[in-house]
Image: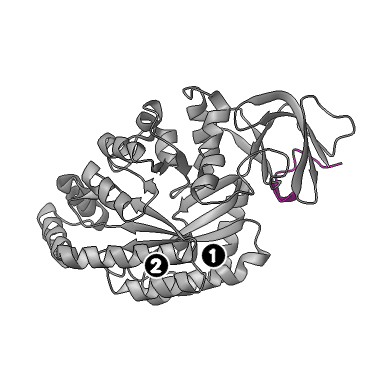
Amino acid sequence: MWLSDFQVVLPDRVIPKGAVRVRDGVIAEISETPVAAAGIEGRGMLLLPGMIDIHGDMIEREVEPRPNVRMPMELGLRDLDRKLASSGVTTAYAALSFSPGSTYGHLRSFEHTSAMIRALRKARAGLLVDHRIHARFEVTFPKALDVVSGLVAEGSVDLISLCDHTPGQGQYRDLELYTANLARAKKIEMDEAAVTVAERITERTRPAAEMSQVLGAIARTCRAHGVALASHDDDTPAKVALMRDIGAAISEFPVTIEAARAAHAAGMLTVMGAPNALRGLSYSGNLSARQAHEAGLLDILAADYHPSAMLPAVLALAGADPQGLAGAARLVSLNPARALGLKDRGRIAPGSRADLVAADPQGVGHVRMTLREGRIVYSDGSLAAT
């Protein structure tokens, strides 16, 4: 099947009016000109590699759309799967946490998170998108070490990120802002919120020796089973150095420009949120993805909490990228593929998986069709296959 008359986005350039032939689920040929009698006529729309989301925090909200309103897990997975496909995501790493002391503690208990991971694994074959597991390991909850290690050993985890959401560091280093946000979210007075924050700091503070032991154990587990390791919310060059020393090759959501520079210098790939890039600022007042991109420090865009922001974010960054749309598209395709060891996807090239996205670049951008291994998994009907 030919997809013809598209702006074909290659890793290093864009073919203005090209075509791509798909055969047996892979890309068989690329033409610099349109092809007659094509299977799908693009009418000048974009043809991009299927997007790879390294970090998506959406599954818990699908399973529990309102507090204490639990939906069947099968329904939540199905709905998330359809949202991802309609956003142009063909490979998705569901970020699932083990942190029973968090705001979403009832959803992030060891038992419930483990059940979601196994349910997603079991459902994979029948879903539209290639779903993977990104386990977020809270280093302040060492009791989760055995659970996470067991899941890694059984092959149920594909990526681990090391998180510490203790107020006063990382994402929440601004205690005053954190306290104000908590007071607003909980509808309580600032004094009461300040007490809660102090209690959380006390609960999550661990001796340095215990933290080192936990970090070393999870790093050894990842190395033994070939699972990628990422740091999370790096706020200082010192933290970046610590994470790099234990084997992290990815720096997720660095919260300061200094941390992002240190990660880049250490050879780590930096990940930031597509919503941040689209809006031009972090909702928590941290580093702007656009600032990181302008400084040459942004390697990967993740859906974070909003997958439909990925295409618009790519289009928003394309104008400032040294390689234009081709460079911006790599942030959601080739770069995450390389970071995660996915050698069969992430680019439009002969021999690669035919994971493709047909998109209208007008306005915020609109995904018109998504193909996974050459099979149409989403279409809004505007591009008909002949």
The answer to whether 299 appears left or right of 201 in the picture is right
Split into 4 quadrants, where in the image is the N terminus?
A: top right
Q: Residue at x 37, y 47 (%)?
A: 252
According to the image, label 1 marks what residue?
76
According to the image, label 2 marks what residue?
221
In the figure, 97 relative to 335: above or below? below
Q: Position of residue 105 (x, y in %)?
A: 32, 68
- Answer yes or no: is residue 82 visible: yes
Amino acid tagged 1: Gly
The answer to whether 116 appears left or right of 248 in the picture is right
Element marked by disc 2: helix
| Residue 377 is a magenta residue | yes
Colour pattern: one colour
Crowding at mark 1 (Cα within 10 Å: few <14, some 14-19, many 20+): some
**Which one is nearer the viewer's eye here, 227 or 325?**
227
Q: Which residues are magenta?
A: 371-386
Q: Residue at x 66, y 66 (%)?
A: 125
Amino acid tagged 2: Thr
In the figure, 228 relative to 41: above or below? below
Element marked by disc 1: helix
